[in-house]
Image (cartoon, rainbow, N blue to C red):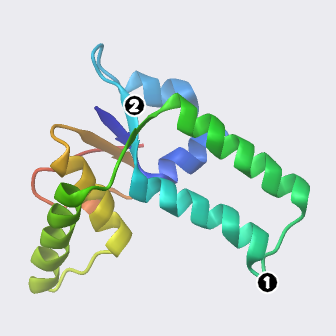
Amino acid sequence: MIYLDSDVAIDWMHGAIKREIILGKLGQEDKLAITAPSLYEIYQGLYILQWDKKRKKGGALIERERTAIEKLRHSLIEVPWDGNAAQKSAEIYHMLAAKGEGLDVFDTMIAGTIIAHGEGTLITRNARHFDRIPDLHILSV
């Protein structure tokens, strides 16, 4: 399974990364997926546009974003953040914190979800955020 990190999924939604580049990284048996924490981050951006007073945008833009997110969701396998993912995410967070290497909680949730759900590779533009996590395979774009 190949997982899109939030940044790559957003770039794909907006055409900044061509679908062919992502698909070119897949093996014959690979499937594209996204974690629930990545979807959370994507929806955060949508609701910032809708409710943040400093960045509030018009209804047409919000609807285009909502439509793009739904299209993205329908083209990927959604992987939930469940109890096993929660346990692995907390382990990753505190393992890194103990070494003085903090990591954003949502990045630990993304990594924990991938590892807890078995073999998988994360495609990201932020490899340095994730390269300290054992058992997480990373591809950079």
Query: Helix, strand or loop at disc 1?
Result: loop
Quadrant the C terminus occupies: top left
> Can you give x and y, in whole percent of width and height, for residue 76 in the image?
47, 33
> Do we see residue 17 in this rendering?
no
Badge 1 density bin: few <14, some 14–19, many ≥20, Cα 10 Å: few
- Give the x, y percent position of residue 10: 58, 49
Mark 1 highlights which residue?
54
Q: Which residue is mark 2?
A: 32
Task: Report the amino acid beneath label 2.
Answer: Leu
> Residue sitting at 9 percent across and 84 percent down?
98
Q: Is residue 70 visible?
A: yes
Of 85 and 57, the residue lying toward us? 85
- Mark 2–mark 1 distance (CA, rounded to whole Å): 35 Å
Residue 72 numbered tag: none
Quick one: label 2, few (<14), some, or many (20+) residues within 10 Å?
some
Q: Amino acid at mark 1?
A: Lys
Residue at 41% in and 22% down: 24
Q: Is residue 71 above or below residue 110?
A: above
